[in-house]
């Protein structure tokens, strides 16, 4: 079994889905079951904290499989290749948040679990890069005390708290 990302990168706010192709190396004469799992991916194992996307945070909803052109259904268990079938397309919805993030990666892992014509526990992974569309936050206001409240002065020697407002989450 092998997986590949279609395309190898997506853009938050422009692309609605991350799509993968799952392929068998050859057609089987019996059904083949493959377990799928979305995972955090990394481009550089030395700095995974800077590059990992998070399934369920950067993606939303279930994996879906294309059952006929343009018709997608949720994957609710192992993905089954019919006899003779060698390729399936799966996708997951991409979240367009308003948080500035570095380049992140989401990975799909596929593992063969049943089928007479394929080596069991064969697995493959592939990942897609998710490009962010959000600008880093900027300070939009600094106000002493609570915004709009008449608490802008304090007795000398007391603490004064400032409220800082950002343009978007950090």
Image: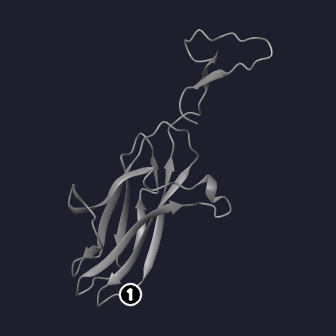
**Where residue 12 appears, x then y in whole percent?**
45, 43
Q: Is residue 147 above or below residue 16?
A: above
The correct choice, above or below, for 24 with respect to 159 in the image is: below
Q: Residue at x 54, y 52 (%)?
A: 104
For residue 156, above or below residue 61: above
Label tally:
1
Q: Quadrant of residue 137?
A: top right
The image shows residue 162 at horizontal and vertical percentages of: 66, 21
Residue beneath the point at 32% across and 62% down:
90
Scheme of image coloration: one colour
Quadrant containing the N terminus is bottom left
18 sits to left or right of 117: right
Residue 24 left/right relative to 100: left
Give the residue drawn at x 57%, y 60%.
42
Which residue corresponds to mark 1?
Answer: 120
Say whether residue 75 is visible.
yes
Residue 9 vs residue 51, the one in the foreground: 51
Q: Quick one: SS at disc 1?
A: loop
| Local crowd size for mark 1, using a 10 Å CA cut-off: few (<14), some (14–19), many (≥20) | some
- Judge from the rendering whether residue 96 lies leftward or rightward of residue 91; answer left or right: right
Q: Which residue appears farthest toward the bottom when viewing the image? A: 116
The residue depicted at 76 percent of the width and 18 percent of the height is: 158
Report whether residue 25 is seen. Answer: no
Which quadrant holds residue 21?
bottom left
In this orientation, which residue lies closer to the viewer: 9 or 132? 132
Image quadrant containing the C terminus: top right
């Amino acid at each position: 079994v092998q997986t590949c990302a279609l395309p190898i990168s997506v853009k938050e706010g422009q692309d609605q889905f991350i799509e993968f192709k799952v392929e068998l190396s050859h057609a089987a004469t019996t059904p083949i079951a493959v377990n799928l799992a979305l995972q955090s991916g990394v481009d550089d194992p030395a700095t995974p904290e800077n590059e990992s996307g998070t399934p369920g945070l950067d993606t939303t909803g279930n994996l879906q499989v294309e059952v006929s052109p343009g018709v997608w259904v949720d994957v609710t268990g192992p993905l089954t290749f019919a006899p003779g079938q060698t390729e399936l397309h799966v996708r997951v919805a991409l979240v367009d948040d308003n948080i500035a993030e570095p380049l992140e990666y989401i990975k799909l892992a596929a593992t063969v679990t049943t089928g007479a014509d394929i080596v069991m526990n064969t697995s493959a992974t592939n990942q897609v890069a998710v490009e962010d569309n959000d600008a880093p936050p900027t300070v939009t206001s600094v106000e002493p005390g609570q915004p709009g409240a008449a608490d802008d002065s304090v007795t000398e020697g007391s603490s004064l708290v400032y409220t800082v407002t950002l343009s978007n989450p950090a």
